[in-house]
Amino acid sequence: MEAMIRSILTLLETQAMLSNIQFVVNAENNLPHVSCEENQLKQAFINLIKNAIEAMPDGGQIDIDLRSEGADSVRIVFKDRGQGIENDVLARLGEPFYTTKEKGTGLGIMITYKIIEDHRGHLVVESKVGEGTVVSVTLPSAYE
């Protein structure tokens, strides 16, 4: 899982540098293996990281933490210190075609929710306006 995250960060490195964004990855040793369709999960994580980058127009840091949740799951937490999401918008995340972005379609987060769900996982978004957003993805391990 850590290798996948790091490969995604390499893909997004130029966009992050242009936006004055730094990535900090904290990964627990010996994480359980997650059985997954790797390209799908990569797409979901790319969507989440791009959203975090876009939430910080003045730059900043995105923390990505990977840790086990017991022996049966892995949690990946993406934390930005961006603009945050208002409660009424938060309640509608994942709805098709709902977006607050000028050039957005609203499909990225909807697809992300679907990919995580298809992997028997859970995605939780917590946010405070002016403080940032934390997205937690929990996925079952291959050994559960």
Image (spheres, rainbow, N blue to C red):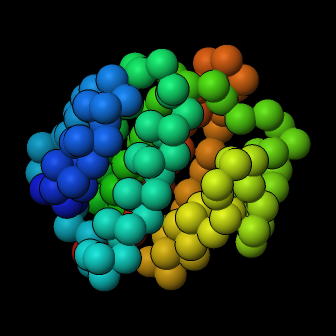
Residue at screen point 70% across, 25% down: 128
The vertical placement of 64 against 4, above or below, is: above
Q: Nearer the viewer, residue 17 or 7?
A: 17
Left-right relation of 138 to 10:
right
Residue at screen point 37% across, 29% down: 19
Q: Residue furthest right?
A: 88
Q: Where the N terminus falls, by quadrant?
A: bottom left
Residue 30: x %, y % from top left:
12, 51
Left-right relation of 143 to 47:
left
Residue 24: x %, y % from top left:
25, 29
Residue at screen point 63% across, 25% down: 83
Q: Nearer the viewer, residue 142 or 8?
A: 8
* Residue 71 in view: yes
Left-right relation of 87 to 5:
right
Left-right relation of 131 to 86:
left
Res. 93 image quadrant: bottom right
Res. 140 image quadrant: bottom left
Residue 110: x %, y % from top left:
63, 68
Residue 119: x %, y % from top left:
44, 77
* Residue 70 in view: no
Residue at screen point 75% across, 68% down: 97
Report the number of discs: 0
Q: Where the C terminus falls, by quadrant?
A: bottom left
Q: Nearer the viewer, residue 44 or 12?
A: 12
